[in-house]
Image: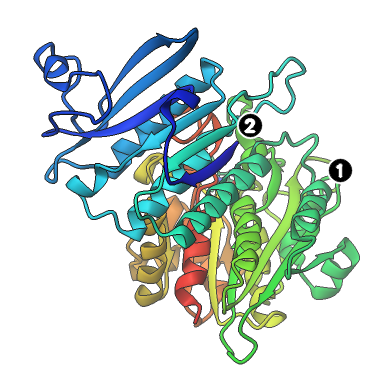
Amino acid sequence: MQLKLVDKLKAEALDALIIGVTENQEVIENSELNLSLLKEKQLFEGKTGESFTATVLKEGSIHHLILLGLGSEESFNLTKVIKTLATLIKDQKKKKVATIGIDFSMLSKVTEAGNKLQRQLFSGIAMCDYEFNDYKTDAKPSTLETIEILNNSYNTQAFEEAVLLGETNVFSRMLTNMPANIMTPEKLADLAVSYAEGSQLEIEIKEQNEIEALGMKSYLAVAKGSSNPPKLIVMRHKGDPDSDKVFGFVGKGLTYDSGGLSIKPTASMVNMKDDMGGASAVIAAMGAISKLGLKVNVVGVVAACENMISGISYKPGDIIESMGGKTIYIGNTDAEGRLTLIDAVTYVQKIEGATHVVDIATLTGAAIHCLGSEAAPVVTNNEDFYFAVEKAFEKANEKIWMMPVFDEYKELVKHDQADLTNTAGSPGTITAGLFIGEFAKDIPWVHIDIAGTAFKEKAEGIYSKGGTGSGAIPLVYLAKKMSK
Ligand code: BES
Ligand code: MG
Ligand code: ZN
């Protein structure tokens, strides 16, 4: 599907036309639709997020004329509008349309059509066409060819960037959705390499022997039980060689999490091919950061592996070492994500010179209990850096929320037989974060737990069932914010 800004929408040439209508609007120019009649019959009032579809036969062809309520200055809600818009576009796809036009010229009557709004709108449109059907042999290719958006003095640069970001989100979702029998650590590394091809990104895949030489013993303990070897994926964007600042983006990349010997029940295991949502976000974001040529240094790191069971798997009760030097008591082999992340966090500081670290991970089921599927809980050691990250999420219309870090919680990650334990108990999301924080040392660090936001059980608005790409666009905005 191609997204275009056009100076004129030729209604007769479009299969469907979506027109934004405000609550107070009386007429739609060049249209036979009578708004006061629709209002009188309570069919459509222009409320924010409301819609009305009229299907007309004209000169032998079918046209869908769709009204989308923008509301009023007081009631306008962009999230609702985008959600309805996405649902309408998906509806039209089902009706096998090829071209859709969007006329949102009335938007300026209810809100300031600023860049932020435009970006969310355009990214949202670019995101709603994706569906995960790559493995259905009878899947029909989408008939939707073009969406034309009437150019209402939009900023074309913002438009192009927003579309790129929408595609970045879709790429991230594609990675997350691929099943674990295909998406092995090796496959993830190969896909990252081909994604980086033709860009300025430097990419390096470190093999098991190199990971051993680096002393990433905690990461290797998790990877040990699988026949598919680990791959450490490192992507570098050196956008500002004159600056000492390096932002490390670390994504959890468990291409499968069976729980290990502390095996998960089947129902909890089926979605664990998605335990690499953090990795997908980081890899996708790195591509966009490079394409946008941002003047900032960012290193993306994914310690990809599988958490499996075999004769040499790590075991509950084990005491393991880590690249950062601290020893760890294994209370539960299913708390594996943090073990891979700590070595990646140490690696990105020690070897890549990161001065700031963001890690993003489908880390704890408890995150879902904290904030459900709407927002991702965060643990940080630096509020200023947190607020920068929060702004980047806001810009992308995604939500994060800072969890409290009390001294009492910090005590919970300690253990009597080793320096730390990987199962510090409740509050599970915070103690998991604090465990990683032990390895961030004193540099600004933000840990984002996307266990609740990384995938959806059913399609909703711009999202399809499965991976949501949560964090991918915000990471690009963060890099942009940090760039010169
Ligand atoms: N990958 C899971 C977390 C998860 C759960 C993500 C549900 C998405 C949906 C993680 O590795 C895990 O198993 N965490 C355990 C930790 C516990 C054993 C301390 C959990 O949350 O139960
Ligand atoms: Mg686990
Ligand atoms: Zn996991």
Q: What residue type is labelled 2?
A: Met
Up/down of 264 relative to 371, above or below: above
Residue indicated by mark 1: 311
Name the residue rendered at 52%, 44% in the picture: 4
Compute the Cα span from label 1 to label 2: 20 Å
Q: Residues within 10 Å of mark 1 (few under 14, many from 20)?
A: few
The quarter holding residue 97 reads top right
Q: Which of marks 1 and 2 is nearer the N terminus?
A: 2
Q: Can residue 401 be seen in this view?
A: no
Name the residue rendered at 35%, 74% in the picture: 383
Q: Which amino acid does label 1 sit on?
A: Gly
Drawn side of residue 405 relative to residue 318, left or right? left
Drawn side of residue 43 relative to residue 453, left or right? left
The quarter holding residue 385 reads bottom left
Query: What colour scheme does the image use?
Result: rainbow
Name the residue rendered at 83%, 41% in the picture: 310
Residue indicated by mark 2: 269
Q: Residues within 10 Å of mark 2 (few under 14, many from 20)?
A: some
